[in-house]
Image (spheres, rainbow, N blue to C red):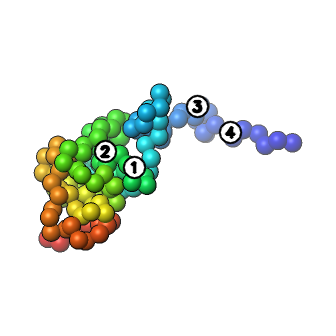
Amino acid sequence: ASPSAPLPPASHTPWTTVGPSNIGDSITPDGGEAGTVQPVVAAAANPDVIYTGGNNNAASSGVLKSIDFGRHWVKVNRGLADTRIHGLYIVDQHGEHVVAGTPSGVYETLDSGGSWTHIAQTRGWGVANSFRNGS
């Protein structure tokens, strides 16, 4: 005998798929897969603001940002020469000041991902996987 389908929740309402869904950085007609996303961070004062980083065998999407709790995503990569994101950290409470760790050092944005600047002192660090607030 084959196993039967699972019973619905106790409320007897049907199951609803809520995700995950593709972010859509592919050339396939359906929006495709987004590769591997590694770090995910949300702003403490506004959890609707989420950043994540792609790292898929050097063919990654870079930094993706959502302002609606992950329902929609946009790439925020202007100035980000290395899009292999291994670590992310939101410095402030609102998600305007963010740092991103890559194999070529750390990048920083002060304008919510509008533009990124490579922090020159971090060039020789190698991969920055995690960050800690030292204040």
Indicate the amino acid at tag 4.
Leu
Measuring from the top left, give residue 78's x and y in whole percent. 20, 44
Q: Is residue 45 visible?
A: no
Q: Residue at x 31, y 63 (%)?
A: 103
Above or below, comparing residue 132 to residue 95 in the picture: below
Q: Which of marks 1 and 3 is nearer the N terminus?
A: 3
Q: Which image quadrant is residue 87 in?
A: bottom left
The residue under label 1 is: 59
Q: Work out how far the residue at label 1 is from the one at label 3, CA to CA, in angstroms.
A: 42 Å
Q: Which mark is in front, 4 or 1?
A: 1
User: Mark 1 near mark 3, Cβ–Cβ under 8 Å?
Assistant: no
Residue sitting nearer the eye, 26 or 129: 26
In the rendered image, which quarter contains the N terminus? top right
Q: Earlier in the sequence, mark 4 or mark 1?
A: 4
The residue under label 4 is: 7
Indicate the amino acid at tag 3.
Thr
Q: Earlier in the sequence, mark 2 or mark 4?
A: 4
The residue under label 3 is: 13
